[in-house]
Amino acid sequence: MNFSHIPVMLEECIEGLNLKDNGIYFDGTIGGGGHSYEILKRTAPNGRLIATDLDDDAINAANERLKEFDKRFKIYKSNYKDFEEVLKAEQIESLDGAILDFGVSSYQLDNADRGFSYMKPDAPLDMRMNISQDFDAQTLINEYSQKEIADILKRYGEEKFASTIAANIVKARTREAITTCGKLVKIIEESIPKKFQQNGPCARKSFQAIRIAVNEELAGLYECVVGLAKRLKKGGRLVILTFHSLEDRIVKQAFKYLETDCICDKNIPVCVCGKKQEIEIITKKPIVASLNEMAINSRSKCAKLRIAEKII
């Protein structure tokens, strides 16, 4: 199966980066290389790109797609949150821009072997972005306690029936291991009253929650956003595309902190913290996909784009 993925809000992201001809850019979630391709094309002849991803298939696809740009890019198999190590390896002190696109790729969802989709009943429960890690969705579902599973479904999926789903998972796995997406979907559907199953697939929230937990998607995200902003040159842009409210909330909070000029207690008459405003938030409200894009690419419907510019 070929790696395919339609980048969401491609033009909006690229415009948001405010590209410079000879700039140095970081793409922390390269996927199939859609954003990276445009960055390299529009910063010719000397623009440079450093990228990371945990998915071997994505890295291979991106290397193939970007090969025309030869020595102007390098992709590391690494978590974007470890950007400091990557930049150190490349001897890069500062960036002209950085982009993070947190969307799960079409390839990952459509490839049954990867076990990301609740619409692939025979797919193995997996959900690993990095297939070389040992921990997967099957391990979580079959070995975590009922309370741990319920907490994950509540925290990362905002699932109101988390306790019932977790209880039924534990009950079902005593009979046989839950090894496929279809088996898990059946348990979830049986745990949610019919009247609450009218607004789309009822397994969506639980699958999102399990995927986030398996890949530790939210751990260290706030610190990463703040750290990347500090690596930007004055005028550099940080562009972040999120696909659910938990991610977006963290990005919004990080931007708010970076935009704040002082974090002292309001009762102190004079600032003693020394905190200075570091960014200007370009998107006071997040940008969403156009109606036309939503019609063409349904995965853009929940996307939110936030952009900030370094001012010091």
Image (cartoon, rainbow, N blue to C red):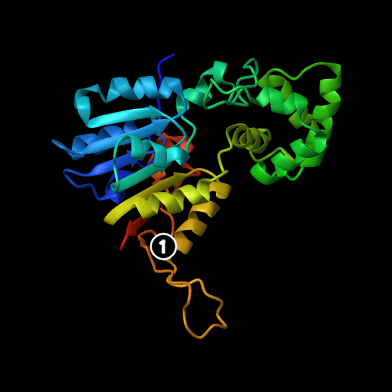
- Tell me which amino acid carries mark 1: Lys
**Most foreground residue, 287 or 263:** 263
Point 81% across, 35% down: residue: 146
Residue 185 figure quarter:
top right
Outermost residue to the bottom:
269
Point 51% across, 19% down: residue: 111
Circle 1 residues within 10 Å: few <14, some 14–19, many ≥20: few
Is 308 positioned to the left or the right of 43 in the image? right
**Most foreground residue, 71 or 141:** 71
Is 137 positioned to the left or the right of 59 in the image? right
Residue 256, given in percent of the width and then of the height, sits at: 47, 63
Residue 82 figure quarter:
top left
Q: Is residue 171 above or below residue 206?
A: above
Q: Is residue 105 above or below residue 157?
A: above
Point 57% across, 43% down: residue: 219
Q: Secondary structure at mark 1?
A: loop
Quarter in which the N terminus is drawn: top left
Residue 222, given in percent of the width and then of the height, sits at: 51, 51
- Report if residue 126 is visible in the image: yes
Quarter in which the C terminus is drawn: bottom left
- Report if residue 186 is visible in the image: no
**Which residue matches tag 1?**
284
